[in-house]
Image: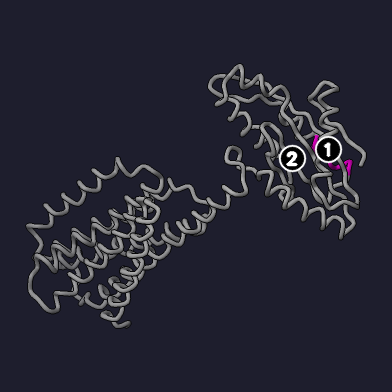
Protein backbone atom coordinates (compact mmCIF):
# COMPACT_ATOMS: atom_id res chain seq x y z
CA UNK A 1 0.00 0.00 0.00
CA UNK A 2 1.13 3.52 -0.72
CA UNK A 3 2.43 5.44 2.25
CA UNK A 4 -0.56 7.48 3.52
CA UNK A 5 1.40 10.36 5.14
CA UNK A 6 3.33 10.79 1.88
CA UNK A 7 0.09 10.88 -0.14
CA UNK A 8 -1.40 13.45 2.25
CA UNK A 9 1.73 15.61 2.15
CA UNK A 10 1.85 15.62 -1.67
CA UNK A 11 -1.88 16.34 -1.84
CA UNK A 12 -1.57 19.25 0.58
CA UNK A 13 1.32 20.72 -1.40
CA UNK A 14 -0.44 20.36 -4.77
CA UNK A 15 -3.74 21.76 -3.50
CA UNK A 16 -1.97 24.74 -1.89
CA UNK A 17 -0.24 25.49 -5.22
CA UNK A 18 -3.43 25.04 -7.25
CA UNK A 19 -5.51 27.01 -4.74
CA UNK A 20 -3.02 29.90 -4.68
CA UNK A 21 -2.88 29.88 -8.49
CA UNK A 22 -6.67 30.01 -8.78
CA UNK A 23 -6.96 32.82 -6.23
CA UNK A 24 -4.28 34.81 -8.08
CA UNK A 25 -6.34 34.35 -11.28
CA UNK A 26 -9.38 35.63 -9.42
CA UNK A 27 -7.58 38.80 -8.33
CA UNK A 28 -6.27 39.21 -11.88
CA UNK A 29 -9.49 38.55 -13.82
CA UNK A 30 -12.18 39.04 -11.14
CA UNK A 31 -13.98 35.84 -12.19
CA UNK A 32 -15.83 34.40 -9.15
CA UNK A 33 -15.46 30.79 -10.38
CA UNK A 34 -11.70 31.02 -9.71
CA UNK A 35 -12.37 32.32 -6.18
CA UNK A 36 -14.71 29.44 -5.35
CA UNK A 37 -12.45 26.74 -6.81
CA UNK A 38 -9.38 28.21 -5.14
CA UNK A 39 -11.28 28.23 -1.85
CA UNK A 40 -12.36 24.62 -2.47
CA UNK A 41 -8.71 23.56 -2.76
CA UNK A 42 -7.77 25.38 0.44
CA UNK A 43 -10.76 23.97 2.36
CA UNK A 44 -9.55 20.50 1.37
CA UNK A 45 -6.02 21.37 2.54
CA UNK A 46 -7.25 22.56 5.96
CA UNK A 47 -9.49 19.48 6.23
CA UNK A 48 -6.50 17.20 5.70
CA UNK A 49 -4.39 19.14 8.20
CA UNK A 50 -7.06 19.15 10.95
CA UNK A 51 -7.81 15.44 10.39
CA UNK A 52 -4.09 14.60 10.51
CA UNK A 53 -3.79 16.29 13.91
CA UNK A 54 -5.55 13.24 15.41
CA UNK A 55 -2.12 11.60 15.57
CA UNK A 56 -0.81 14.36 17.86
CA UNK A 57 -3.76 15.73 19.87
CA UNK A 58 -7.01 14.42 21.32
CA UNK A 59 -9.43 17.25 20.47
CA UNK A 60 -12.37 15.70 18.56
CA UNK A 61 -13.99 19.13 18.19
CA UNK A 62 -11.09 20.08 15.89
CA UNK A 63 -9.84 16.79 14.49
CA UNK A 64 -13.31 15.33 13.80
CA UNK A 65 -15.96 18.05 13.84
CA UNK A 66 -14.00 20.90 12.18
CA UNK A 67 -12.33 18.48 9.76
CA UNK A 68 -15.74 17.15 8.67
CA UNK A 69 -17.12 20.66 8.12
CA UNK A 70 -14.06 21.64 6.09
CA UNK A 71 -14.25 18.52 3.92
CA UNK A 72 -17.96 19.26 3.28
CA UNK A 73 -17.13 22.88 2.45
CA UNK A 74 -14.76 21.81 -0.35
CA UNK A 75 -17.40 20.34 -2.72
CA UNK A 76 -19.86 23.10 -1.75
CA UNK A 77 -17.34 25.72 -2.88
CA UNK A 78 -16.72 23.72 -6.09
CA UNK A 79 -20.49 23.70 -6.75
CA UNK A 80 -20.60 27.48 -6.37
CA UNK A 81 -17.66 27.67 -8.78
CA UNK A 82 -19.56 25.67 -11.38
CA UNK A 83 -22.62 27.90 -11.06
CA UNK A 84 -20.46 31.03 -11.07
CA UNK A 85 -19.02 30.01 -14.43
CA UNK A 86 -22.55 29.71 -15.82
CA UNK A 87 -23.40 33.01 -14.03
CA UNK A 88 -26.06 31.47 -11.80
CA UNK A 89 -24.18 31.29 -8.50
CA UNK A 90 -26.14 33.93 -6.56
CA UNK A 91 -29.28 31.87 -6.09
CA UNK A 92 -27.18 28.91 -4.90
CA UNK A 93 -25.38 30.79 -2.12
CA UNK A 94 -28.27 30.30 0.30
CA UNK A 95 -28.64 26.62 -0.61
CA UNK A 96 -24.95 25.90 0.03
CA UNK A 97 -24.98 27.94 3.24
CA UNK A 98 -28.07 25.99 4.37
CA UNK A 99 -26.31 22.65 3.73
CA UNK A 100 -23.25 23.79 5.70
CA UNK A 101 -25.29 25.13 8.66
CA UNK A 102 -27.43 21.99 8.71
CA UNK A 103 -24.24 19.89 8.73
CA UNK A 104 -22.91 21.92 11.66
CA UNK A 105 -26.09 21.32 13.65
CA UNK A 106 -26.35 17.61 12.85
CA UNK A 107 -22.67 16.78 13.38
CA UNK A 108 -22.10 18.72 16.61
CA UNK A 109 -23.97 16.30 18.94
CA UNK A 110 -22.26 13.26 17.35
CA UNK A 111 -18.84 14.75 16.57
CA UNK A 112 -17.07 12.30 18.91
CA UNK A 113 -18.84 9.17 17.66
CA UNK A 114 -18.73 7.00 14.49
CA UNK A 115 -21.92 8.73 13.33
CA UNK A 116 -19.83 11.84 12.57
CA UNK A 117 -17.94 9.95 9.89
CA UNK A 118 -21.07 8.24 8.54
CA UNK A 119 -23.15 11.42 8.23
CA UNK A 120 -20.35 13.54 6.77
CA UNK A 121 -19.61 10.82 4.19
CA UNK A 122 -23.28 10.78 3.13
CA UNK A 123 -23.33 14.57 2.78
CA UNK A 124 -20.12 14.57 0.73
CA UNK A 125 -21.47 11.83 -1.57
CA UNK A 126 -24.61 13.92 -2.19
CA UNK A 127 -22.53 17.05 -2.84
CA UNK A 128 -20.33 15.33 -5.43
CA UNK A 129 -23.36 13.76 -7.10
CA UNK A 130 -24.96 17.17 -7.41
CA UNK A 131 -21.69 18.69 -8.71
CA UNK A 132 -21.64 16.13 -11.55
CA UNK A 133 -25.28 17.02 -12.30
CA UNK A 134 -24.57 20.77 -12.21
CA UNK A 135 -21.86 20.43 -14.88
CA UNK A 136 -24.58 19.91 -17.50
CA UNK A 137 -25.12 23.70 -17.52
CA UNK A 138 -21.57 24.48 -18.54
CA UNK A 139 -21.15 25.54 -22.17
CA UNK A 140 -17.60 24.66 -23.17
CA UNK A 141 -15.87 23.94 -26.47
CA UNK A 142 -13.66 21.13 -25.28
CA UNK A 143 -16.17 18.48 -24.24
CA UNK A 144 -13.42 15.99 -23.31
CA UNK A 145 -12.30 18.13 -20.36
CA UNK A 146 -15.87 18.52 -19.17
CA UNK A 147 -16.35 14.76 -19.45
CA UNK A 148 -13.19 14.15 -17.41
CA UNK A 149 -14.35 16.57 -14.73
CA UNK A 150 -17.77 14.94 -14.60
CA UNK A 151 -16.14 11.50 -14.40
CA UNK A 152 -14.05 12.65 -11.42
CA UNK A 153 -17.18 13.84 -9.59
CA UNK A 154 -19.08 10.63 -10.37
CA UNK A 155 -16.18 8.43 -9.21
CA UNK A 156 -15.84 10.56 -6.09
CA UNK A 157 -19.55 10.21 -5.33
CA UNK A 158 -19.35 6.42 -5.81
CA UNK A 159 -16.29 6.16 -3.55
CA UNK A 160 -18.11 8.09 -0.83
CA UNK A 161 -21.20 5.92 -1.30
CA UNK A 162 -19.14 2.74 -0.87
CA UNK A 163 -17.52 4.22 2.25
CA UNK A 164 -20.95 5.19 3.61
CA UNK A 165 -22.32 1.65 3.12
CA UNK A 166 -19.26 0.09 4.74
CA UNK A 167 -19.41 2.45 7.73
CA UNK A 168 -23.13 1.85 8.24
CA UNK A 169 -22.67 -1.93 8.06
CA UNK A 170 -19.76 -1.73 10.50
CA UNK A 171 -21.77 0.51 12.85
CA UNK A 172 -24.67 -1.99 12.84
CA UNK A 173 -22.27 -4.88 13.48
CA UNK A 174 -22.95 -6.61 10.16
CA UNK A 175 -19.23 -6.79 9.35
CA UNK A 176 -16.85 -8.77 11.56
CA UNK A 177 -13.64 -8.05 9.63
CA UNK A 178 -11.28 -5.13 10.17
CA UNK A 179 -12.11 -2.33 7.70
CA UNK A 180 -9.03 -0.20 8.41
CA UNK A 181 -7.16 -1.29 5.25
CA UNK A 182 -10.22 -0.84 3.02
CA UNK A 183 -10.98 2.59 4.50
CA UNK A 184 -7.32 3.57 4.04
CA UNK A 185 -7.56 2.68 0.34
CA UNK A 186 -10.78 4.68 0.07
CA UNK A 187 -9.11 7.64 1.78
CA UNK A 188 -6.16 7.51 -0.63
CA UNK A 189 -8.58 7.32 -3.57
CA UNK A 190 -10.52 10.26 -2.14
CA UNK A 191 -7.36 12.35 -1.85
CA UNK A 192 -6.09 11.46 -5.35
CA UNK A 193 -9.43 12.09 -7.08
CA UNK A 194 -9.91 15.40 -5.26
CA UNK A 195 -6.45 16.58 -6.27
CA UNK A 196 -7.01 15.44 -9.87
CA UNK A 197 -10.32 17.31 -9.98
CA UNK A 198 -8.63 20.44 -8.69
CA UNK A 199 -6.07 20.18 -11.49
CA UNK A 200 -8.58 19.62 -14.31
CA UNK A 201 -10.70 22.67 -13.49
CA UNK A 202 -8.05 25.42 -14.01
CA UNK A 203 -6.79 23.58 -17.12
CA UNK A 204 -10.30 23.52 -18.58
CA UNK A 205 -10.97 27.16 -17.69
CA UNK A 206 -7.65 28.29 -19.13
CA UNK A 207 -8.25 26.47 -22.42
CA UNK A 208 -11.79 27.87 -22.60
CA UNK A 209 -10.47 31.40 -22.02
CA UNK A 210 -7.96 30.89 -24.84
CA UNK A 211 -10.78 29.61 -27.05
CA UNK A 212 -12.87 32.70 -26.27
CA UNK A 213 -9.95 35.00 -27.13
CA UNK A 214 -9.39 33.06 -30.36
CA UNK A 215 -13.08 33.32 -31.25
CA UNK A 216 -13.07 37.08 -30.59
CA UNK A 217 -10.17 37.45 -33.02
CA UNK A 218 -11.35 35.04 -35.71
CA UNK A 219 -15.13 34.70 -35.54
CA UNK A 220 -18.19 36.82 -36.08
CA UNK A 221 -19.73 37.19 -32.59
CA UNK A 222 -23.32 37.06 -33.88
CA UNK A 223 -23.33 34.01 -36.15
CA UNK A 224 -20.22 32.18 -34.91
CA UNK A 225 -18.93 31.97 -38.49
CA UNK A 226 -15.45 33.08 -39.48
CA UNK A 227 -14.98 36.84 -39.80
CA UNK A 228 -13.55 38.47 -42.92
CA UNK A 229 -9.96 38.60 -41.62
CA UNK A 230 -9.65 34.91 -40.76
CA UNK A 231 -11.64 33.88 -43.86
CA UNK A 232 -9.25 35.69 -46.20
CA UNK A 233 -6.22 34.23 -44.44
CA UNK A 234 -7.46 30.62 -44.62
CA UNK A 235 -8.86 31.06 -48.15
CA UNK A 236 -5.48 32.18 -49.48
CA UNK A 237 -4.03 28.91 -48.17
CA UNK A 238 -6.80 27.03 -50.00
CA UNK A 239 -5.94 28.91 -53.18
CA UNK A 240 -2.26 28.02 -52.89
CA UNK A 241 -3.16 24.34 -52.44
CA UNK A 242 -5.51 24.47 -55.45
CA UNK A 243 -2.75 25.98 -57.61
CA UNK A 244 -0.17 23.47 -56.40
CA UNK A 245 -2.46 20.48 -56.94
CA UNK A 246 -4.03 21.87 -60.15
CA UNK A 247 -7.52 21.41 -58.69
CA UNK A 248 -10.62 23.54 -59.14
CA UNK A 249 -12.06 25.75 -56.43
CA UNK A 250 -15.31 27.70 -56.24
CA UNK A 251 -15.99 30.99 -54.46
CA UNK A 252 -19.49 32.16 -53.54
CA UNK A 253 -20.77 35.58 -52.53
CA UNK A 254 -24.18 35.44 -50.84
CA UNK A 255 -26.47 38.32 -49.89
CA UNK A 256 -29.87 38.22 -48.15
CA UNK A 257 -32.49 39.87 -50.37
CA UNK A 258 -34.28 42.97 -49.03
CA UNK A 259 -32.79 42.45 -45.59
CA UNK A 260 -33.24 46.11 -44.67
CA UNK A 261 -37.01 45.55 -44.76
CA UNK A 262 -36.68 42.89 -42.08
CA UNK A 263 -34.90 45.30 -39.75
CA UNK A 264 -37.29 48.14 -40.53
CA UNK A 265 -40.47 46.08 -40.15
CA UNK A 266 -39.59 43.72 -37.30
CA UNK A 267 -36.65 45.43 -35.54
CA UNK A 268 -32.94 44.79 -35.29
CA UNK A 269 -33.29 41.99 -32.74
CA UNK A 270 -35.36 40.02 -35.24
CA UNK A 271 -32.83 40.95 -37.93
CA UNK A 272 -29.99 39.53 -35.83
CA UNK A 273 -31.89 36.27 -35.30
CA UNK A 274 -32.60 36.12 -39.04
CA UNK A 275 -28.86 36.43 -39.74
CA UNK A 276 -28.18 33.52 -37.38
CA UNK A 277 -30.90 31.47 -39.08
CA UNK A 278 -29.49 32.12 -42.55
CA UNK A 279 -25.96 31.32 -41.33
CA UNK A 280 -27.14 27.94 -40.00
CA UNK A 281 -28.99 27.21 -43.24
CA UNK A 282 -25.88 27.94 -45.30
CA UNK A 283 -23.65 25.87 -43.03
CA UNK A 284 -26.08 22.95 -43.01
CA UNK A 285 -25.68 22.54 -46.78
CA UNK A 286 -21.88 22.71 -46.83
CA UNK A 287 -19.37 19.90 -46.50
CA UNK A 288 -17.01 19.56 -43.56
CA UNK A 289 -14.00 21.00 -45.42
CA UNK A 290 -15.89 23.96 -46.97
CA UNK A 291 -15.24 27.45 -45.62
CA UNK A 292 -17.96 29.99 -44.78
CA UNK A 293 -17.80 33.48 -43.25
CA UNK A 294 -19.94 36.50 -42.59
CA UNK A 295 -17.98 39.30 -44.22
CA UNK A 296 -20.46 42.16 -44.03
CA UNK A 297 -23.87 43.15 -42.69
CA UNK A 298 -25.96 40.55 -44.50
CA UNK A 299 -23.19 39.26 -46.78
CA UNK A 300 -21.61 35.83 -46.59
CA UNK A 301 -18.67 34.31 -48.47
CA UNK A 302 -18.00 30.64 -49.14
CA UNK A 303 -14.97 28.76 -50.46
CA UNK A 304 -15.53 25.27 -51.89
CA UNK A 305 -12.17 23.48 -52.33
CA UNK A 306 -11.79 20.69 -54.90
CA UNK A 307 -15.12 21.65 -56.48
CA UNK A 308 -15.97 21.94 -60.16
CA UNK A 309 -18.26 24.61 -61.59
CA UNK A 310 -21.13 22.13 -61.93
CA UNK A 311 -20.73 20.94 -58.35
CA UNK A 312 -20.48 24.53 -57.12
CA UNK A 313 -23.64 25.57 -58.94
CA UNK A 314 -25.51 22.53 -57.59
CA UNK A 315 -24.42 23.28 -54.01
CA UNK A 316 -25.27 27.00 -54.41
CA UNK A 317 -28.74 26.07 -55.63
CA UNK A 318 -29.20 23.77 -52.63
CA UNK A 319 -28.32 26.64 -50.28
CA UNK A 320 -30.75 28.97 -52.09
CA UNK A 321 -33.60 26.44 -51.95
CA UNK A 322 -32.95 25.58 -48.28
CA UNK A 323 -33.67 29.22 -47.43
CA UNK A 324 -36.37 29.87 -50.05
CA UNK A 325 -38.41 26.75 -49.20
CA UNK A 326 -38.46 27.43 -45.46
CA UNK A 327 -39.66 30.30 -43.27
CA UNK A 328 -37.79 32.04 -40.49
CA UNK A 329 -39.87 31.80 -37.28
CA UNK A 330 -39.31 34.30 -34.48
CA UNK A 331 -41.62 35.73 -31.80
CA UNK A 332 -44.77 34.57 -33.58
CA UNK A 333 -43.52 36.04 -36.87
CA UNK A 334 -43.14 33.86 -39.96
CA UNK A 335 -40.80 35.62 -42.37
CA UNK A 336 -39.98 34.46 -45.89
CA UNK A 337 -36.36 35.13 -46.82
CA UNK A 338 -34.35 34.58 -49.99
CA UNK A 339 -30.75 34.99 -51.09
CA UNK A 340 -28.86 35.96 -54.19
CA UNK A 341 -25.65 34.11 -55.02
CA UNK A 342 -22.69 34.90 -57.25
CA UNK A 343 -20.29 32.05 -58.03
CA UNK A 344 -16.90 31.88 -59.71
CA UNK A 345 -14.75 28.81 -60.43
CA UNK A 346 -11.00 29.20 -60.06
CA UNK A 347 -8.82 26.82 -62.08
CA UNK A 348 -5.31 28.25 -61.79
CA UNK A 349 -3.46 31.55 -61.64
CA UNK A 350 -4.07 34.09 -58.90
CA UNK A 351 -3.24 33.45 -55.26
CA UNK A 352 -5.30 36.45 -54.14
CA UNK A 353 -8.68 35.45 -52.79
CA UNK A 354 -9.89 39.08 -52.85
CA UNK A 355 -9.71 39.03 -56.67
CA UNK A 356 -11.73 35.81 -56.70
CA UNK A 357 -14.38 37.23 -54.37
CA UNK A 358 -14.57 40.41 -56.46
CA UNK A 359 -15.49 38.28 -59.51
CA UNK A 360 -18.07 36.34 -57.48
CA UNK A 361 -19.43 39.67 -56.26
CA UNK A 362 -20.06 40.68 -59.87
CA UNK A 363 -22.20 37.57 -60.21
CA UNK A 364 -24.05 38.55 -57.04
CA UNK A 365 -24.68 42.02 -58.47
CA UNK A 366 -26.11 40.48 -61.66
CA UNK A 367 -28.34 38.18 -59.61
CA UNK A 368 -29.80 41.23 -57.87
CA UNK A 369 -30.30 43.07 -61.17
CA UNK A 370 -32.04 40.02 -62.63
CA UNK A 371 -34.64 39.97 -59.84
CA UNK A 372 -32.85 38.33 -56.86
CA UNK A 373 -33.41 34.86 -55.36
CA UNK A 374 -31.13 33.19 -57.91
CA UNK A 375 -27.61 31.94 -58.61
CA UNK A 376 -25.46 33.62 -61.27
CA UNK A 377 -22.19 32.04 -62.46
CA UNK A 378 -19.31 34.20 -63.64
CA UNK A 379 -16.54 33.17 -66.00
CA UNK A 380 -13.06 33.86 -64.60
Q: Secondary structure at mark 2?
A: strand
Residue highlighted by disc 2? 301
Residue 39 to residue 316: above or below:
below
Disc on the earlier residue, 1 or 2: 2
Magenta span: predominant SS is: helix
Disc 1 versus disc 2: distance between alpha carbons? 9 Å
Residue highlighted by disc 1? 360
> In what quadrant of the picture does the N terminus appear?
bottom left
Q: Are marks 1 and 2 in contact (CB under 8 Å)?
A: yes
- Identify which residue is drawn at 36% across, 47% down: 83
Q: Secondary structure at mark 1?
A: helix
Q: Is residue 283 left or right of residue 125?
A: right
Residue 123 to residue 8: above or below:
above
- Residue 5, percent across and down? 26, 80
Residue 29 to residue 16: above or below:
above
In the image as oriented, which residue stretches furthest toward the right? 379
Query: Is 178 a magenta residue?
Result: no
- Residue 166, percent across and down? 24, 66
- Identify which residue is drawn at 83% across, 27% down: 367
Residues in magenta, as a range: 309-316
Q: Is residue 128 left or right of residue 48?
A: right
Amino acid sequence: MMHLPTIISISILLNVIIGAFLLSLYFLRQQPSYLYWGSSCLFFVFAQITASLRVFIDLPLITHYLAALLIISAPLAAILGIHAYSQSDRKYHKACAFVLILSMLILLPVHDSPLNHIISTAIIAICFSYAAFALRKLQVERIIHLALLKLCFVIHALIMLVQFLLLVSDYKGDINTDLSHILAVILISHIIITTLTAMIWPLMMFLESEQILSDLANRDPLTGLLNRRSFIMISNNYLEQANSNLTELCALMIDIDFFKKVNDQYGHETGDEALKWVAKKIKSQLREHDLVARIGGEEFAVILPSTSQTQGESLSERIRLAIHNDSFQYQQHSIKLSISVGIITHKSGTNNVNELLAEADKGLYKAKLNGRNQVVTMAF
